[in-house]
């Protein structure tokens, strides 16, 4: 092979006839597959084939704790047509065919991430041994990027583990640990990391001596349990296959509503392979891979991936000289839903001990129980040992006074949403904490600047806005005032990342960014309801558009009372465009708080699920099915959010369109396949967005007046992403 140092592959020939083929991409922390490896692979396998001393091969990673994390997706952007992208898939297929057809047995030694193209390599090998390490994860996550496994995975995976299990992996993109992979039949044996290469060598040697065992699962084995029996019944005859694929598609569409073409193509391609054989399956795989690479859905999903990768490296401030300070202890005020959730991510993920304070012992206790509940679930799911769980629990200590706060460099407050209370907290923390203590508020709507007015050094006051439930929601919105010091921002961004969050930094103001853009969408849904559109029609229209939950259902989840309170703050700040329709206050007066008290727009408890029809009477509305088309409902609600996002951008609340897209997707469920509000504007075109807004402005009301930046963009043909772009806080003249 060429220059050893620059090569991603190297070979260790052992005396026992087993050669270890190491993959170690130079200069990268993880192995990913790139186009230009084809030549290296070909050379390495040619060498292994001709070398008579080599009887068997182990394919292993030179990166400790990471096998192959997938194919490098940068190369997809270079493909100019579906045909070019299909060609990339065919090259990958050929490389995998070469491994599968290799005359000497090849066994994959998997330690760490084995995902996408990485798993396709492993599937092409003649055997697979995985390590029991926590880092070992196997999966085919291509569909999350709007793609399908393009190097034979759609064919080999079902062949190895059965159609149903393979579809589950590919359609969801889920990752499984080694134990589960063994159960599925994805790997042959699970051993500790330290011996994974050695055991793989043993398997390879055995295969060389005795032949590779035939993997076609025998009838007896297939009948071992009922799922295999179902598999057999469903896949081996045409009628059964039809049932299986029809059911899978129906289930899929219930979730995706047809908005995610990759999942549909995966079903198509697996079905073709099953009915017409491997060659036809591979051809369909390459063709659809090419088409998907060119699809707007994949472009949007890949943009999210690139954005989150870039955000991992973003310190949150523009000055590269500013470094985050070390945080050895975090103080947490308020042990309610949010406080306890934040305590969990701080101890479990950021590995930083937390001092959790509430008003009284009962408050502290319920917070600690909440943390324990999350940890216990992880133990139940075997994600954590009971011993580790006990140790983790010790990292959160409770208190009803400020003892221990002198050590906390950062104090996060999540007490009640009350400005005076929060100001009191600032004063108390500054008295109890170290000199430069950072005071971070988790308020969902109060301007941080108003909280900071109580501070002796407002440069240390910042907002850290988490989303509920904290341990599940990926976004953290950090709010900086004009006075917040850069080191404070950088320190909180770093802490947030360690807590596992994707962090956006936004400017201060009522509702910041996320609450501010959600409010007009929810308000529009209320207007549409007041115009007579039935509740289910509103929620269904938004689900069809791609939101994970409809706005009326969301109001029930958030709490009608909470929504009304936030609505008032927004109305006060932004005036008419956020004024709710008349009658909404009657819901609160009727003691309808939503899910939490079982009285809302929908029915809860034992009563059958569905809309609580009595709500129309309270609102004084007569529902008129079909009064508004689904398209009008979806556009009006979405445009309200998008236009507000554009106002935020024009006013400099956001640092970039990227942050605005990610904030809306990760915090509010903006449809990921649309790429976020700003990519949505780019895709539709600023001119068309303005035209639609102005139509609604004439027909519905002045709240649809287009944001000034949109008008400027429409006139000058500018976009938020790409080449001729706009800058946050500047309206082009
Ligand atoms: N719940 C959400 O979805 C959500 C989302 C984002 C932000 N927030 C914000 O987070 C904050 C807390 O919300 P929550 O839902 O956790 O409320 P919660 O009512 O569950 O918890 C508040 C906790 O603060 C405690 N507390 C009150 N005064 C205190 C004091 N002086 N010292 C110490 N503890 C005190 C209470 O005893 C209670 O345990 C609010 O500002 C809210 O707006 C909530």
Image (cartoon, rainbow, N blue to C red):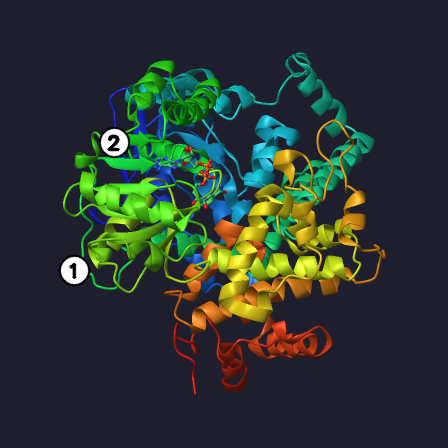
Q: Is residue 681 visible?
A: yes
Question: Where is residue 343 drawn, in percent x and y?
Answer: 35, 33
Q: Is residue 419 above or below residue 731?
A: above
Image quarter (top left, top right, bottom left or bottom right) of the C terminus = bottom left
Q: Quadrant of residue 359?
A: top left
Would you call the spot at circle 1 few (<14 residues within 10 Å), some (14-19), or many (20 or more)?
few
Q: If the picture is divided into quarters, which one holds ligand 1?
A: top left
Q: Quadrant of residue 297?
A: bottom right
Q: Is residue 208 above or below residue 125?
A: above
Q: Tell me whether the residue at label 2 lies in contact with that at label 1, contact meaning CB atoms closer than 8 angstroms.
A: no
Residue occupied by mark 2:
12
Image quarter (top left, top right, bottom left or bottom right) of the N terminus = top left
Q: Is residue 683 visible?
A: no
At a point 73% along the width and 22% down the height, the residue shown is: 230
At a point 55% along the width and 63% down the height, the residue shown is: 571
Would you call the spot at circle 2 few (<14 residues within 10 Å), some (14-19), or many (20 or more)?
few
SS assignment at label 2: strand
At a point 52% along the width and 61% down the height, the residue shown is: 570
Q: Nearer the viewer, residue 604 or 327?
A: 604
At a point 25% along the width and 25% down the height, the residue shown is: 14
SS assignment at label 1: loop
Taking 667 as reference, is 259 left or right? right
Q: Quadrant of residue 279?
A: top right
Q: Nearer the viewer, residue 488 or 378?
A: 488
Residue occupied by mark 1:
321
Taking 373 as reference, is 525 left or right? right
């Amino acid at each position: 092979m060429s220059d050893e140092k620059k090569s991603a592959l190297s070979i260790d020939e052992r005396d026992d006839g087993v050669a270890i083929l190491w993959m170690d991409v130079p200069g990268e922390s993880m192995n990913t597959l790139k186009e230009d490896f084809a030549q290296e692979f070909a050379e390495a396998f040619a060498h292994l084939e001709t070398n008579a001393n080599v009887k068997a091969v182990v394919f292993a990673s030179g990166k400790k704790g990471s096998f192959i994390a997938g194919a490098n997706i940068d190369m997809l952007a270079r493909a100019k047509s579906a045909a070019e992208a299909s060609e990339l898939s065919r090259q990958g297929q050929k490389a995998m065919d070469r491994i599968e057809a290799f005359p000497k047995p090849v066994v994959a030694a998997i330690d760490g991430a084995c995902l996408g193209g990485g798993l396709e390599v492993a599937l092409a090998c003649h055997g697979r041994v995985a390590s029991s390490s926590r880092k070992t994860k196997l999966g085919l996550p291509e569909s999350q990027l709007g793609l399908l496994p393009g190097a034979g995975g759609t064919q080999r995976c079902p062949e190895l583990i059965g159609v149903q299990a393979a579809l589950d992996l590919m359609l969801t993109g889920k990752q499984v640990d080694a134990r589960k992979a063994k159960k599925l039949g994805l790997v042959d044996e699970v051993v500790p990391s330290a011996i994974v290469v050695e055991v793989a060598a043993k398997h390879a040697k055995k295969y060389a001596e005795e032949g590779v065992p035939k993997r076609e699962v025998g009838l007896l084995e297939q009948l071992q349990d009922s799922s295999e029996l179902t598999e057999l019944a469903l896949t081996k005859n045409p009628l059964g296959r039809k049932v299986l694929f029809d059911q899978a598609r129906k289930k899929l569409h219930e979730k995706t509503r047809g908005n995610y073409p990759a999942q549909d193509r995966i079903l198509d391609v697996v079905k073709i392979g099953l009915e017409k054989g491997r060659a036809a399956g591979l051809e369909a795989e390459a063709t659809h891979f090419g088409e998907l690479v060119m699809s707007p859905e994949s472009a949007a999903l890949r943009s999210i991936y690139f954005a989150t990768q870039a955000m991992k490296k973003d310190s949150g401030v523009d000055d590269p000289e500013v470094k985050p300070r070390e945080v050895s202890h975090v103080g947490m005020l308020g042990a309610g839903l949010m406080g306890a959730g934040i305590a969990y991510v701080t101890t479990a993920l950021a590995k930083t001990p937390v001092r959790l304070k509430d008003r009284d012992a009962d408050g502290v206790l319920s917070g600690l129980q909440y943390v324990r509940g999350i940890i216990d679930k992880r133990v139940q799911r075997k994600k954590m040992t009971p011993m580790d769980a006990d140790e983790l629990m010790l990292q959160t200590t409770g208190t009803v006074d400020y003892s221990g706060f002198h050590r906390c460099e950062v104090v996060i407050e999540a007490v009640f949403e009350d400005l005076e209370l929060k100001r009191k907290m600032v004063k108390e923390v500054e008295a109890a904490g170290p000199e430069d203590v950072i005071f971070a508020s988790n308020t969902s709507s109060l301007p941080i600047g108003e909280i900071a007015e109580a501070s002796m050094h407002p440069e240390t006051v910042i907002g850290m806005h988490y989303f509920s439930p904290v341990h599940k929601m990926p976004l953290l919105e950090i709010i900086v005032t004009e006075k917040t010091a850069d080191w404070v921002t950088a320190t909180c961004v770093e802490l947030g990342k360690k807590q596992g969050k994707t962090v956006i930094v936004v400017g201060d103001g009522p509702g910041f960014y996320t609450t501010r853009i959600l409010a007009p969408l929810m308000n529009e849904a209320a207007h549409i309801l007041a115009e007579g559109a039935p509740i289910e029609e509103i929620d269904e229209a938004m689900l069809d558009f791609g939101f994970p939950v409809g706005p009326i259902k969301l109001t029930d989840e958030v709490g009608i009372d909470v929504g009304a309170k936030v609505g008032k703050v927004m109305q006060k700040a932004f005036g008419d465009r956020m004024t709710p329709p008349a009658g909404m206050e009657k819901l609160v007066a009727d003691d309808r708080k939503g899910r939490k008290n079982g009285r809302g727009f929908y029915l809860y408890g034992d009563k059958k699920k569905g809309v609580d029809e009595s709500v129309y009477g309270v609102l004084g509305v007569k529902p008129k099915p079909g009064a508004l088309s689904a398209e009008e409902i979806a556009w009006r609600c979405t445009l309200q959010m998008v236009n507000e996002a554009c106002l935020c951008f024009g006013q400099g609340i956001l640092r970039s369109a990227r942050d605005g897209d990610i904030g809306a997707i990760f915090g509010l469920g903006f449809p990921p396949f649309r790429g976020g509000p700003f990519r949505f504007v780019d895709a539709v075109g600023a001119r068309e967005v303005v035209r639609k807004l102005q139509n609604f402005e004439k027909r519905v009301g002045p709240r649809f007046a287009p944001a000034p930046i949109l008008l400027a963009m429409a006139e000058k043909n500018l976009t938020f992403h790409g080449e001729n772009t706009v800058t946050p806080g500047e309206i082009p003249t």
